[in-house]
Amino acid sequence: MLTIGALQAGVKANIIPDDATLKLNIRTYDDGVRDQILSAVKRICCAESAASNAPREPEFTTLDSFPATVNDTVATGKVAETFHAQFVDKAYESERVSASEDFSVYGRNWNVPYVYWFVGGTEPKTYLEAKKKNQLNTIPSNHNPRFAPVIHPTLKTGLLAMMTAALAWLD
C-alpha cells in the first residue's frame, strides 16, 4: 500500500513554487515487495522530472524505514492460547493488516521471537453497526485524526492483555 501523507509546495497562491516535498508511506507484507514499490516510485518521479524538463533530478530522503512485522509462529500460538483462556470469545486472530510499525525492529535486532496484537477500542454499538453494513474499514484507527477509542474498558483490557501475555512465559 502506498500512502501520500503530505504534499508541501509553495507559500502563496499566486507564486509558482520552485520545489515541492512529497511524503510517502509504503506498507507491504514483504520486504522485497516494499523495495520494488520504492524503486518504482523513484523511477516514476525521475521520469516525470525528465519529461517536465526540470532543472534538476528529484531528491529522495528516507525519513523512516520499518521491516514487515511477521509474528513468530510458536510465540503467537502460546500467547493466543492464553488470550483465549483469559478473554474467551473476545480473543481471535485478525486478518493481516498493513501497518507502518517499528515493533518488529526490536525482535529482529535482538533476534528474539515476537508477537504483535491489537486491542479493540471502538464503542461496541458502533463496531456492530459497521460490521453489519460490511463497513469496518470506515472506523477510524490510530494515526487517523478521528481516532477516539473508548478509554474504559480499552485501557483496562490493554493492560490485562499485556499481563496475560507476560504470564504465558512465566508458566
Image: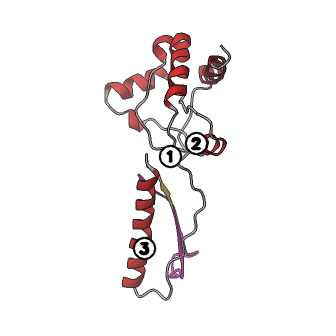
Residue that appears at 51% across and 34% down: 71
Q: According to the image, label 3 marks what residue? A: 45
Picture coordinates of residue 144, whole percent (x, y) = 53, 44
Gap between marks 3 and 2 measured at Cα: 30 Å
Q: Are marks 1 and 3 in contact (CB under 8 Å)?
A: no
Residue interval drawn in magenta: 1-23
User: Which residue is nearer to you in this view: 87 or 106?
Assistant: 106
Residue extending farthest to the left is 133
What is the three-letter code of the residue carrying label 3?
Cys
- Report the residue marked by disc 1: 68
19 in the magenta segment: yes
Could you tell whether 10 is left or right of 131 in the image?
right
Of label 2 and label 1, which has the lower sequence position? Answer: 1
Residue 88 picture location, percent across and down: 49, 11
What distance separates the C-alpha of mark 1 from that of mark 3? 25 Å
Q: Amino acid at mark 2?
A: Ser
Of marks 1 and 3, which one's residue comes earlier in the chain? 3
Mark 1 vs mark 3, foreground winner is 1
**Magenta stretch holds residue 66:** no
**Image quadrant of residue 131?**
top left
**Contact, mark 3 vs mark 2 (Cβ under 8 Å):** no
Residue located at (45% from left, 44% from top): 98
State the SS at label 3: helix
Q: SS at mark 1?
A: loop
Numbered tag placed on residue 104 in the rendering: 2
> Which is more foreground, mark 3 or mark 2?
2
The answer to whether the residues at label 2 and label 1 have Cβ atoms under 8 Å apart is yes
